[in-house]
Amino acid sequence: MPKAADHNHAQRLIEIFSAAWVGHVRFQEEVIYPLLERRPNEEQCRCAVLFDRQHSEIQFANDEVVEMLRMTRSSKAASDALAYLLRHVAERRRDHVEAEHVLLLPALRQALAPIERKTYLEWAAANPLPFAGIGPDR
């Protein structure tokens, strides 16, 4: 972490950090869960409960990072706490996305009909980031 905060970089990080996570959660709530709910099974329900809990926990950690970025931006000083929080949230997000790839994507491949895959692809095309490279066919 630099000794002094760059106000422009801090503001951009706040915008990106918030938007990327909101987009991730919105994607699952608007696309993935409705598609899976049409063919519920016990494993999918467990995955949904796990991912909902992780989404809430990560959102809380994201909020802490954003608050710390705001404080850093206003005080012109970077902190060890911010560096720690960024690492913590990045690790949590990485672990969460890896779990989704292991648990959720196989369920999607099994559960989705061709028309549902089309719905997913249309939604992903209209909302490209942070979804590039993530899909039931990958």
Image (cartoon, rainbow, N blue to C red):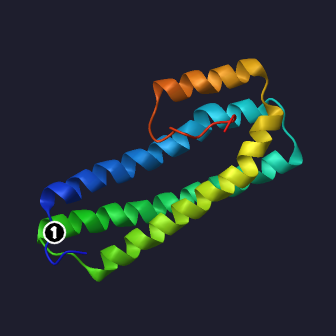
Q: Residue at x 87, y 48 (%)?
A: 42
Which residue is at 52% across, 44% downward? 24
User: Circle 1 — which element?
Assistant: loop
The foreground one among 83 and 62 is: 83
Left/right of residue 7 with respect to residue 35 in the rendered view: left
Vertical placement of 43 versus 112: above or below?
Answer: below
Q: Horizontal and vertical percent for residue 126?
A: 47, 24
Q: Is residue 31 left or right of residue 60?
A: right
Which residue was labeled with disc 1?
5
Residue 35, percent across and down?
72, 30
Left/right placement of residue 40 relative to residue 121 reads: right
Q: Is residue 76 left or right of residue 117?
A: left
From the top left corner, tell me how far across and down residue 61 is, in percent. 45, 65
Q: Residue at x 46, y 49 (%)?
A: 21
Q: Nearer the viewer, residue 115 or 48?
A: 115
Q: In the picture, residue 31 is in which quadrant?
A: top right
Residue 82 in percent (x, y) is at 31, 74
* Amino acid residing under circle 1: Ala
Decide: few, some or many residues near mark 1? Use Cα within 10 Å; few <14, some 14-19, many ≥20: some
Is residue 99 something that shows in the picture? yes
Q: Quadrant of residue 72?
A: bottom left
